[in-house]
Amino acid sequence: VQLVESGGGLVQPGGSLRLSCAASGFTFSRYGMTWYRQGPGKERDLVAAVGLSDSLTYYEDSVKGRFTISRDDVENTVYLRMNSLKPEDTAVYYCMTHLGDSDYWGQGTQVTVSS
């Protein structure tokens, strides 16, 4: 199992980014996918999750209405579209999937929201 995130960077407050997580090594279409983030000095927290279709989603309260999670089962990729970014969204963002008894994580991508 391999998960590779990309798309992070430096953005001004109010800006947008789209994160991608390319998956391989398992049957992507059969598993839910999640995005977590870990800010400086903070614990890693769940941000958003998607089930086997884009109609099954979950968002942490602070990102509702600003972030959108989606999946492409042809490209084996899960996305996190982030709009109206705030400084408090600054974090390393990780994608994760749960297979069997194990959680599999990507290496993370840094998002910094600053003027």
Image (cartoon, rainbow, N blue to C red):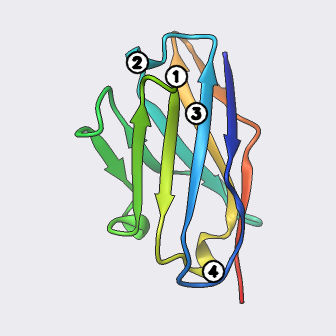
Callout 1, which amino acid? His
Q: Which mark is residue 98?
A: 1
Going by the numbered disc 4, the residue's amino acid type is Pro
Q: Amino acid at mark 2?
A: Ser
Say whether marks 1 and 3 touch (CB < 8 Å).
yes
Q: Which residue is mark 3?
A: 96
Please give the name of the residue rendered at 59% of the width and 44% of the height, measured from the top-left corner.
20
Vertical relation: 36 (above or below) 1: below
Label count reads 4
Residue 59 place in picture, x, y as percent: 37, 54
Foreground pick, 78 / 39: 78
* Crowd class of label 1 (few under 14; some 14 to 19; many from 20; radius 10 Å): few
Amino acid, disc 3: Met
Find the residue positioned furthest to the bottom: 115
Q: Earlier in the sequence, mark 4 or mark 1?
A: 4
* Label 4 close to label 3 by CB (< 8 Å): no
